[in-house]
Image: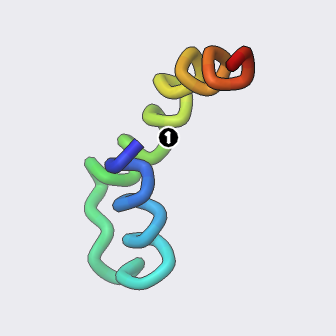
Amino acid sequence: MKRLVFLRDLIAHEYYRIKEEELKEMVELPKQTKPFVEKAKKI
């Protein structure tokens, strides 16, 4: 989750220095957090 927050801030404040690897990560990370979100909904 920390990494998602970092990437969000990067988009919002420092979009001019985003690297290609970070863009790919931005696409993949939300997919990986889906199980966490589903589990949190049940609590």
Quarter that holds the C terminus: top right
Q: Which residue is painted at 32% across and 68% down in the image?
A: 18
Asked whether, in this view, residue 20 is left or right of residue 32, the answer is: left
In terms of secondary structure, where does tag 1 sit?
helix
Camera-nearest residue between 7 and 17: 7
Q: Which residue is painted at 45% across and 33% down in the image?
A: 28
Disc tally is 1
Tell me: residue 33, above or below residue 21: above
The percent position of residue 12, horizontal first and vertical second, equals: 50, 78
Tell me: residue 36, above or below residue 19: above
The percent position of residue 42, horizontal first and vertical second, equals: 73, 15
Camera-nearest residue between 42 and 10: 42
Q: What residue type is labelled 1?
A: Val
Q: How crowded is mark 1: few (under 14 residues within 10 Å), some or many (20 or more)?
A: few
Tell me: residue 41, above or below residue 3: above
Q: Which residue is painted at 50% across and 40% down in the image?
A: 27
Asked whether, in this view, residue 5 is left or right of residue 19, the answer is: right
Quarter that holds the N terminus: top left
Asked whether, in this view, residue 24 is left or right of residue 8, the answer is: left
Residue 5, located in which quarter of the rendered image?
bottom left
Q: Which residue is painted at 47% across and 63% down in the image?
A: 8
Would you name the residue on which mark 1 appears? 27
The percent position of residue 34, horizontal first and vertical second, equals: 59, 23
